[in-house]
Image (spheres, helix red, strand yellow):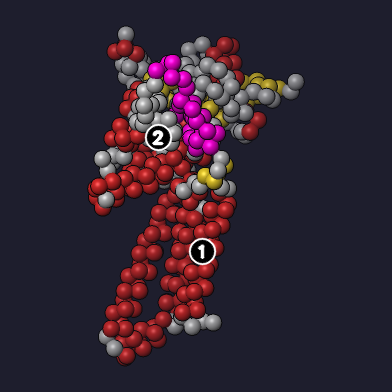
Amino acid sequence: MEDQMSSKPYIREVPRYSWFLRQPRYMRYMLREVTCIFIGAYAVFLLVALRRLSEGREAWESFVQMLTGPASLVFHLIVLAFALYHTTSWFNVTPKAMPIQAGEDFVPGAVIVGAHYAVWLAVSVVLLFLAGVF
Amino acid sequence: MSRRQIELEVLRYNPETDTEPHFQRYSVSCEDEWVVLDALNHIKETIDPTLSYRWSCHMAVCGSCGMMVNGEPKLSCKAFLRNYEGVIRVEPLAHFPIQRDLVTVIDDFVTKLRQVKPYLIPKQEKTLAAGEYLQTPAELKKYKQYTLCINCMLCYAACPEYGLVPKFIGPAAISLAHRYNQDSRDGGREARQQEIAKNEGVWECSFVGACSEVCPEHVDPAGALQQVKIQSTVDWYQEHLMPWKTK
């Protein structure tokens, strides 16, 4: 009987390379994952900056000069956009991964997400202070 | 009562005669409060008695009538026809083999569910005379949400990882393992970790989050899986950095 029941089940193959085009939520997920490439690219950029710095005053000054060009501006704007999406998309899911139970009830998700934004803001202010912006 | 004519496109597959599934269109005169399941029942009773699908309670409790409605995993008893425009496409739950028409082969899920031991394994066995295993309201609330799972498998149909890597234990089974791991009366975590902390366990999950978006009972499997990841990571560090802490 069992053999007869499962005689010829039909298997629908999932397209290996285009599955994420099927659903907007899969596209959003892929967008979140793709942001890491830009975060990685900026890490490489910072390493290059360190290298220029280690090569002496002249190398560093020409690097700083390059930073003021339009290509650098475009690169920074693109990376900033992806970095913001990366950060906010991960911050917004933190209550799922780290729920906090205080007494009987769970701390509202908005509080956990809000705390992340508050710390982000505080760290940014400290960094800008150290960089001499204020 | 107002009636409306709707078009339904249903995926049909007869394993005895078909080599692959095909869509069949039905025109149904439906009432305003009908759900997709009502339309299917109407088709079976008055138009085409050969149409096969699973259902039982018609009230989002039994978890039998899950299917793809316009490409989205839904309980067909909860999918109101009035919320759809144009032709409504009804297909069997994605990522599961099709047995016949809208009926899928669910053996894989049932095997995985059994594998994660989704039942209470008491820390200390008590005799009946010793009384109940007591729990505070806070201890209950810690896992309550995960008890709401009705095994409808919509999360498996939504999960692209499960579609691509079928050996993935998947959202519902891991959430249920987490439910018992979070239970203050339970002592079975180590046995469950053997299953859910391995590669095809929680580490196959890349947090797409689709499972939680489609869950009709708001179990939030994606949340459960991320928590299992964190706890398994803590286990690993304890084992390697603080071996005296592990038994």
Specify the subunit that label 1 lies on: A
**Side (left or right) of B242 relative to B46:** left
Looking at the picture, tell me which residue is in the foreground, B189 or B20: B189
The residue indicated by pointer 1 is: A119
In which quarter of the view is residue B16 placed? top left
Asked if the stretch drawn in magenta spans residue B141, the answer is yes
Up-down: is A104 above or below B91?
Answer: below
**Side (left or right) of B160 relative to B247:** right
Asked if the stretch drawn in magenta spans residue B134, the answer is yes
The residue indicated by pointer 2 is: B181
Residue in the picture at 49% in, 16% down: B51
Image coordinates of residue B181 in percent, x first then y, are 40, 35
Up-down: is B176 above or below B224?
Answer: above
Q: Whole-Å distance between the Cαs marked 1 and 2? A: 32 Å
User: Could one spot residue B139 in this view of the protein?
Assistant: yes
Looking at the picture, tell me which residue is in the foreground, B14 or A62: A62
Question: What amino acid type should be assigned to the residue bearing mark 2?
Answer: Asn
Q: Is mark 2 on a helix, strand or loop?
A: helix
Image coordinates of residue A129 in percent, x first then y, are 50, 79
The numbered dot on residue B219 is none
Residue in the picture at 46% in, 25% down: B133
Tally of marks:
2
Looking at the picture, tell me which residue is in the foreground, B183 or B50: B183
Which segment is the magenta one? B127-153
Residue in the picture at 31% in, 40% down: B197
Q: Residues within 10 Å of mark 1 (few under 14, many from 20)?
A: few
